[in-house]
Structures are given as structure tokens and as C-alpha cells.
Image: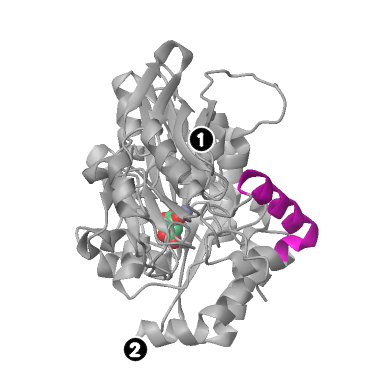
Amino acid sequence: MTAPDLAALRDLLGPPGVLSAPADLERYLVDERRLYRGRAAAVLRPDSTHALATAVAWCHAHGVAMVPQGGNTGYCGGATPDESGQQVVISLERMTRVRRVDASAFALTVEAGATLASVQAAAHDAGLLFPLSMGSEGSAQIGGALSTNAGGLAVLRYGTARDLVLGLEVVLPDGRVWDGLRVLRKDNTGYDLKHCFIGAEGTLGIISAAVLKLFPAQSQRETAWLAVDDLAAACRVLAALRHRLGDAMTSFEYISGESLALVLANVPDTSAPQVVSPAHVLVEIAAGEGHGLRETFERALLALSDEGLVRDAVLAQNETQRRACWRLRETIPAAEKQLGGSVKHDVSVQIDRLPALERAARSAVLAHVPTARLSVYGHVGDGNLHFNVLAPADADPVPFKTAHAEAVSTLVHEAASVLDGSFSAEHGVGKLKRELLRDVEGPLAIELMRRLKQAFDPLGLMNPGKVLLPPDAP
Ligand code: MLT
Ligand code: ZN
């Protein structure tokens, strides 16, 4: 691989389009969890699809490997360059325009570098809703969210990022632009190419813009904090509420007593909810005008409490209380980070198997390290648990992770696998889980994935070494 000629790239992209001073590069070289630190010859920052395509074509012609990067909030190192110093990072951060809002078609066309929060705001300004939502939405960009098929907090009702896309524009590894920006709800014209790029973590091309689905704004929203006995009770509550509330539920988030305690001890501006127990659920429901949502919700919760499924429930009375409840859920990752980080897991199983997953993972991990601290929480409405393992209170987290991360992760992933689950529900594969992907998916699936990679990126220049291990890896 040759080192890129930065003068040529500057001519193509203009001075703001190419960063190369070490201090300017720093924030692009380290991932959110600080698992990886790479080097790069430059960071390219095109400000349009045309500029992006020009830069990619140049890299393709000169054999320069490219690492696309959105908000750099991913958990698996998928947007961090390698240590060679010869790759370029391509940041989408200057491509933030909302190109079109088609309110009557419930669609919006936006460039890849727009943050999720800004897409939500654009939809809101048009009197509509863009529902993809997560703790990192202020910095996570739509292109990255689509490239990792992000999940988040409203999958139960609206699906993952993949379900929210009508069309895509993609710069291919050779610099050609595939224009699939269609505003069509139905379109069966051959293979659905957009789905090749969604969830591909930038290994097949760079998503430069997307047509996103919008939804009617929800004028009524109710949020409840529930105390329950355990995860099994939470799953029963989920099923009961789905029967009683139909599609009104948007979020059903589980927060163990352990995770809540971590937040209360480590995150400023949090205070204990009115009801505390070994396990909690944050439920949010929403609907348009005229549904009497609050009364329906109250009746449902009362019935569940009469049946003994819910120990106690508190409905948020106003937006401040609602925000306080969400803060207890959304800051769990920050609390873990504050304590030196955790060995994170992102496992999913069919929903009724979640209690078995949690039991198996808990007993296996604690048999291995009896003093480890657990932080178990997640998107129970989607069958997705974050089963995170922290160093014992009196231990240094760095040597703990070095000594135990691999064994602990194997135990948790085995527990999911025995139950026909997934080791990556929403965080992707990146660099971190490539071996797992190879070992778990089996040779045929890996062969098909390699053929796809070869078809889209025969020179192997687009985010090399991510998702799939190099073919010669042991
Ligand atoms: C979350 O749901 O908060 C994140 O996906 C999980 C995490 O930070 O571990
Ligand atoms: Zn999550």
C-alpha cells in the first residue's frame, strides 16, 4: 500500500477537506470505548456526494485503503483505522444537509453526516416523527446508524435502522455513485441493493445519503417506571401489555437493580426513582389524538398489579419526570465508563428465552469470577440484553479486563448460542467480533459474505479488516 499524496487530495477537496496535523487527527483515531487506537495518513472530509465520490475514486486509483467514519460512537471498532498509518479515514461530518422533506409521502432525504438528533428535529419541524433514538443520538450520524443497522430505544414499535429506509445513495469502492434514492413504499425491481449496504459497516461502499421513513407525530405519550421481581416477571409484563395496549408501546426497557445502583452512585443529577426493587422496567407508549392513552395505561397497570406481575408503578406526571426516568436508563453506559468500563455484551434471543439466558450467563460468569459486578439491562421488548461485566469493586478495571474479558465473553456468548441467540443484536461486528462471526456463522455463511465483499470491493480497499477477517487469518 502506498502513502497517499496529500497535495493531490487537497487539490480535489480543498484545505478543509483534508486534515493531516497530528492534533487534528487524534479524535478520529480512537474508538468510543478506547479499545482500539489506529494511525491514519489523513482524514478526508468531503462536503458533497460529488466530492466524496472524487476522493474515493482517487483512493481507488492509487490503492489507498479507506475507513468510513460517522459520529464515531460505535462499540466494535468498525470505524477506527489500522496501525499502518497508510489508510485514510473518510469522515462524513460535513455532509449534513436535509435535501428534501416529502411530508405528504412521509419521507425525508438526508445526507449521511446528519446526526440522528438533527434528523429527528427536521421531521419534527415538518409535524412528523423520525423514531430512531438512542443515548448517543446527539453525535451518532445517520450514515453510521444505517451502516451498523442500529437499534436503540424504539425498535419494539418502529424496527431497527434497516426498517426505516426507503432509499439509499452509495459511493461504491471505485468511486461510482449508486443512486437508489427512491421514495417508494413498494418496489420489487430485482435484488434489493440497499439492504446490502445497511449493516455492512462500510465494507461494501459508503452510504452518502438516505431516504428515511417518517411517521405521524405522537401527540400523546405516557411513560411509566415499574418495579418487578425479576427479568422473568418483566417478560410476562411485556406480553400482558402487548395484549392490552396493542401497538401503542414504543419502548420496553429493562434495568436491573445492579445497573440502577451503578447509575445512582456514578452519574450526576440522578436520583432514585420512587419505586426501587431488584428489577425495573421503563415503558413508554404513544398515540395520536383521541385515544385516552393515560386512562388505558393506568387500567392496564392496575390489572397487572392485581395479578401480582407488577410490584409497583409510577407514571411520569410531566416532561421533567419523564426525562428523569429516561436518564436512569440512558446513562447506564456512562456509569460503567466512569468505573473504568465493562466487558460489554449485546446478546439477543427469542423473547421468552431471556430469563434462561440471564440465568445461564449469570451463573457461568459468577462461577468464573465470583466477585465480578454485573450490569444487566437492555431492550427486553426486542429480546436484546446488555449483559455487562465489571471488575470487582476493589479491583483495577484494566487488569481485570485483560485477564477475564475473553473468558467471560465466551461464557456469555455460549449462553446465547445454546438458546439459538445472537452475539450481536445491534452493535455490529467491526473489528471486535470478527473471530466470533467466523466461528459462529459457519463456513457457508462466511463464504457467501466473502463473495459479496469480493463483488463490491474486489481490491479490498473499503474498510478492510472489518466484519470479515483477512482471508489468511489463522
Ligand atoms: C444501550 O442500549 O445503552 C447501548 O446499546 C448499550 C451499551 O452501552 O452497553
Ligand atoms: Zn442497546
What segment carries the magenta color?
Answer: 440-457
Task: Pick the residue in front: 84 or 164.
Answer: 84
Task: Pick the residue in front: 438 or 370.
Answer: 438
Residue found at the far right of this picture: 444
Q: Secondary structure at mark 2?
A: loop
Name the quadrant containing residue 84: bottom left
* Ligand 1, image quadrant it occupies: bottom left
Name the residue type under label 1.
Val
Magenta span contains residue 347: no
In percent of the image, x 32 and y 66: which residue is there?
A: 335
Q: Position of residue 197 (x, y in %)?
A: 57, 41
Determine crowd level at label 2: few under 14, some 14-19, many 20+ residues with C-alpha closer than 10 A. Answer: few
Cα separation between marks 1 and 2 = 49 Å
Residue that numbered label 2 is attached to: 394
| Image quadrant in which the C terminus is located | bottom right
Label 1 beta carbon within 8 A of ligand 1: no
Q: Position of residue 307 (x, y in %)?
A: 57, 48
Q: Is residue 390 visible?
A: yes
Q: Secondary structure at mark 1?
A: strand
Q: Is residue 290 left or right of residue 435?
A: left
Q: Is residue 93 above or below residue 5?
A: above
Q: Is residue 375 above or below residue 290?
A: below
Q: Position of residue 344 (x, y in %)?
A: 48, 68
Query: Do the CB atoms of the residues marked 1 and 2 lie less than 8 Å apart?
Result: no
Name the quadrant containing residue 470: bottom right
In percent of the image, x 27 and y 70: which residue is there?
A: 265
Magenta stretch prevailing secondary structure: helix
Colouring chosen for the image of the structure: one colour
In percent of the image, x 47 and y 14: which residue is there?
A: 105
Q: Is residue 121 above or below residue 422?
A: above
Q: Is residue 146 left or right of residue 457?
A: left
Q: Which mark is residue 170?
A: 1
